[in-house]
Image (spheres, coloured by chain):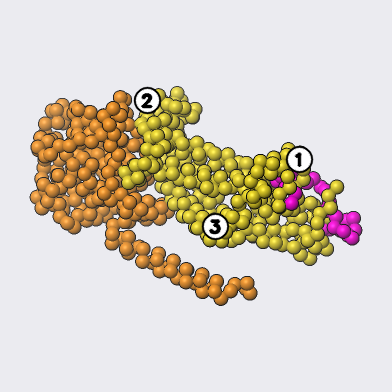
Chain colours: A yellow, B orange
């Protein structure tokens, strides 16, 4: 099925040297020919090829995106450091070095209270890691609140992220995935808007994974649990909350890897520049495709 | 910039002014209501202040979760502590008969209490979880007298804002604000799981602060002092933890 965004393109395929030939243009433009790929990168407005720069991401989306990038990286690094102090995970309310583990990450620990089987203890980084973890969490949560509130007010979610009615059906997803598997070249439509699979993924990350990681993290706070006991009881206990916090973080890392891989495959700067400048360069004439 | 409308300019200006005014007013207000932790300087200050202020507002009167007797951990885990000092060993040899808790600072009647004095105060028990910042935990029954009973007995002055408490082991001291000091679950603990509090778990006397992480529950308490400022203690960061790089407030 063809979505309302035209031919849905998979961002995974980089066009290889296919020249973009606008009508009535010579075969090669001296000095500019390397720039005229299917993806129009770095084409100046003075170029003989008519390229217009159209808005892609609002300032709100760009600023909150990059703040989230920085704070997520800080949370990931410090979270890993905290795990290193006790790389054993449990299920239920309690768990410690004297009880059986649900699973153990096979790494040395930064504390000698954990039986890891390794003969040495890693340097303890928990002090600054815990300070930075919670500071970065505040930045992430406050940024997320601004993003969610402004996104609702400006109809960002309904316009840019919720799939159109026709795209909320399985055939639409299958079309995107099939195109991906066929290694069909991407088209310019998807440099201006997300396809159904991208939209669904972003919505899951924004409205499921991030709220879950915040909830499971808050459930690890003994003071917060004293005020809102249900936060940890619903999750099955404190150690279950810790294990879930670890797994939800793992899903977010998986998303990050796929997200960055797709950007690299679709052309790193072509996808990254709009998230910095807010604008995407799009040819003003339709592409001729073989 | 032609694409900025007057309405947008005025709206943005008003929001920015309100934001600056709010941040300017927030500092003194937070200080007045005791929402600034003693380790609020430095790069971690903003996050630490937000955490402490938010949790203090949210948890002023909340009770730590208590558990049924069936959930008491069969294998509680006591963190190994440094080899005991000679002073501790002498007390241990004497069965802690001479163990004294001195209470001083901003109190009407400074006192030096034996464990038997503490046992003559109302003794309560709670089944709560010890949560280590490393991630592990266990549940035990803790038996002792709420700290508030001792503070009432010595007549803590209304100016007092923090209780500082010291272990017999040097360089091991902590402090809590009055919300935690007067909290009904903050115990001077002398027993655990129907027996005396084992040395490994802080015996003969441990201050349990169940709404904070385990490192605030200092073992082998010999002195508590009431104060209106933490500046005079150690490096002025509130306790030994920030001096070792750890947060003073350990509610998360």
Which comes sooner in the sequence, label 2 or label 1? 2
Q: Nearer the viewer, residue B52 or B164?
A: B52
Label 3 sits on residue: A151
Marks 2 and 1 on same chain: yes
- Residue drawn at 23 percent across, 28 percent down: B193
Chain at numbered mark 2: A
Q: Which mark is residue A99?
A: 2
Which comes sooner in the sequence, label 1 or label 3? 3
Label 1 sits on residue: A183
Q: Neighbour class for label 2 at 10 Å: few (<14), some, many (≥20)?
A: some
Chain at numbered mark 3: A
Task: Give the residue at the far bottom of this rendering.
Answer: B6
Which of the 4 image quarters holds residue B147? top left
Q: Residue A180, image x and y in percent?
A: 72, 41
Distance of mark 1 from mark 3, alpha carbons? 33 Å
What are the residue bounds of the magenta stretch?
A6-32
- Residue drawn at 28 percent across, 62 percent down: B32
The answer to whether residue B159 is left or right of residue A125 is left
Q: Residue B90, image x and y in percent?
A: 16, 30
Instruction: For the N terminus of chain A, give its image quadrant.
Output: top right
Q: Nearer the viewer, mark 1 or mark 3?
A: 3
Q: SS at mark 1?
A: loop
Q: Nearer the viewer, residue A20 or A133?
A: A20
Marks 1 and 3 on same chain: yes
């Amino acid at each position: 099925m063809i979505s309302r965004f035209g031919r849905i393109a998979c961002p995974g395929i980089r066009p290889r040297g296919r020249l973009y030939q606008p009508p009535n243009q010579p075969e090669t433009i001296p000095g500019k020919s390397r720039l005229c790929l299917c993806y129009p990168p770095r084409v100046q407005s003075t170029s003989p090829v008519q390229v217009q720069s159209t808005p892609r991401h609002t300032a709100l989306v760009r600023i909150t995106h990059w703040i989230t990038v920085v704070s997520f990286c800080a949370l990931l690094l410090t979270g890993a450091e905290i795990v290193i102090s006790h790389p054993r995970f449990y299920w239920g309310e309690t768990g410690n070095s004297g009880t059986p583990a649900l699973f153990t990450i096979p790494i040395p620990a930064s504390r000698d209270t954990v039986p890891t089987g390794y003969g040495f203890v890693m340097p303890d980084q928990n002090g600054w890691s815990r300070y930075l973890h919670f500071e970065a969490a505040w930045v992430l949560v406050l940024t997320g609140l601004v993003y969610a509130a402004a996104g609702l007010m400006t109809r960002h979610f309904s316009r840019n992220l919720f799939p159109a009615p026709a795209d909320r059906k399985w055939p639409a997803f299958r079309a995107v995935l099939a195109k991906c598997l066929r290694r069909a070249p991407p088209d310019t439509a998807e440099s201006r808007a997300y396809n159904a699979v991208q939209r669904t993924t972003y919505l899951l990350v924004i409205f499921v994974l991030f709220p879950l990681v915040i909830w499971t993290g808050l459930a690890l706070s003994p003071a917060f649990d004293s005020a809102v006991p249900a936060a940890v009881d619903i999750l099955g206990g404190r150690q279950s909350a810790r294990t879930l916090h670890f797994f939800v973080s793992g899903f977010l890392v998986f998303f990050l890897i796929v997200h960055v891989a797709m950007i690299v495959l679709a052309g790193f700067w072509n996808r990254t520049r709009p998230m910095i400048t807010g604008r995407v360069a799009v040819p003003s004439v339709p592409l001729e495709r073989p | 910039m032609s694409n900025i409308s007057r309405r947008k300019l005025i709206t943005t200006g008003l929001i920015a002014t309100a934001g600056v005014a709010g941040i300017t007013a927030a500092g003194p207000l937070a200080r007045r209501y005791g929402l600034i932790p003693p380790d609020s300087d430095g790069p971690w200050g903003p996050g630490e202040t937000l955490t402490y202020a938010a949790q203090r507002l949210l948890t002023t009167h909340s009770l730590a979760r208590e558990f049924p007797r069936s959930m008491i951990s069969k294998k509680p885990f006591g963190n190994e502590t440094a080899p005991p000092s000679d002073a501790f060993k002498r007390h241990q040899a004497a069965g802690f008969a001479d163990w004294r808790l001195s209470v001083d600072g901003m109190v009407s009647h400074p006192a030096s209490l034996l464990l038997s004095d503490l046992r003559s105060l109302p003794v309560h028990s709670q089944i709560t979880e010890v949560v280590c910042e490393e991630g592990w935990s266990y549940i035990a029954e803790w038996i002792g007298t709420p700290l508030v009973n001792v503070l009432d007995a010595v007549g803590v002055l209304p100016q007092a804002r923090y209780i500082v408490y010291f272990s017999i082991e040097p360089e091991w001291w902590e402090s809590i604000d009055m919300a935690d000091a007067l909290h009904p679950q903050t115990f001077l603990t002398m027993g655990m799981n129907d027996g005396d509090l084992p040395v490994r778990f802080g015996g003969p006397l441990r201050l349990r602060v169940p709404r904070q992480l385990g490192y605030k529950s200092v073992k082998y308490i010999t002195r508590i002092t009431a104060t209106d400022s933490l500046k005079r203690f150690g490096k002025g960061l509130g306790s030994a933890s920030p001096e070792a790089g750890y947060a003073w407030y350990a509610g998360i």
